[in-house]
């Protein structure tokens, strides 16, 4: 079987002893995966971000992907930096939730309170996102629906404007 080695600090290290890490703009490590699932940095990026849109956003924000020795991984439960992980948190609005409509590509801020991992309450009728660009009868906060979806920039703008 072909063995894969990565060069770390000028030394070959076998893949079983390596991990891919996602490093936040502040320098904290925020996610990792054993190297055997992804061979290249490119695959690791796609694996961490789950979509091209999230990857583009995170690369722009300054996130990096690196291969490291498993013994050198320093994942912290909490990041001591402000803002956390070097990224301004997305705005929240009282009485609103970030959610996606069925087969939606982005998360919108909708005037509904939806629990985590749930669908919007029934009988709400057609609900329109605060950006006015998207509407649906059912909105979802299921993790599997949110995964890989970035926030709608118009909703972010509208929420910030509303908070000032
Ligand atoms: Zn940090
Ligand atoms: Zn929106």
Image (cartoon, grey):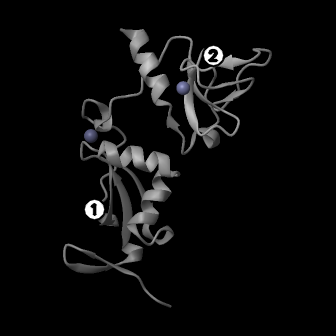
Q: Residues within 10 Å of mark 1 (few under 14, many from 20)?
A: few
User: Is the CB–ligand 1 distance for label 1 below 8 Å?
Assistant: no
Which of 74 and 46 lies nearest the eye of the viewer?
46
| Mark pair 1, 2: CA separation | 44 Å
What residue is drawn where x is 31% and y is 46%? 24
Q: Position of residue 47 (x, y in %)?
A: 49, 58
* Mark 1, residue position: 72
Q: Secondary structure at mark 1?
A: helix
Say which quadrant the C terminus sits in.
top left
Q: Is residue 155 above or below residue 51?
A: above
Disc 1 vs disc 2: which is toward the camera? Answer: 2
* Mark 2, residue position: 112
Which of 65 and 21 lies nearest the eye of the viewer?
65
Q: Is residue 105 above or below residue 83?
A: below
What residue is drawn where x is 43% and y is 86%? 3
Q: Position of residue 83 (x, y in %)?
A: 28, 30
Residue 9, picture quadrant: bottom left
Q: Residue furthest bottom?
A: 1
């Amino acid at each position: 079987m072909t063995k894969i080695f990565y060069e770390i600090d000028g030394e070959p290290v076998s893949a079983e002893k390596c991990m891919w890490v996602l490093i936040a703009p502040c320098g904290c490590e925020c996610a990792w995966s054993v190297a055997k699932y992804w061979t290249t940095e490119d695959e690791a990026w796609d694996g961490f971000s789950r979509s091209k849109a999230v990857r583009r956003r995170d690369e722009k924000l300054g996130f990096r992907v690196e291969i490291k020795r498993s013994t050198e991984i320093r994942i912290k439960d909490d990041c001591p930096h402000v803002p956390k992980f070097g990224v301004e948190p997305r705005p929240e609005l009282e009485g609103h939730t970030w959610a996606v409509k069925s087969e939606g590509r982005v998360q919108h801020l909708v005037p509904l309170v939806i629990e985590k991992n749930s669908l919007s309450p029934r009988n709400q009728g057609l609900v329109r996102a605060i950006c006015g660009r998207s509407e649906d009868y059912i909105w979802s906060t299921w993790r599997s629906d949110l995964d890989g979806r970035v926030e709608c920039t118009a909703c972010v703008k509208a929420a910030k404007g509303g908070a000032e």
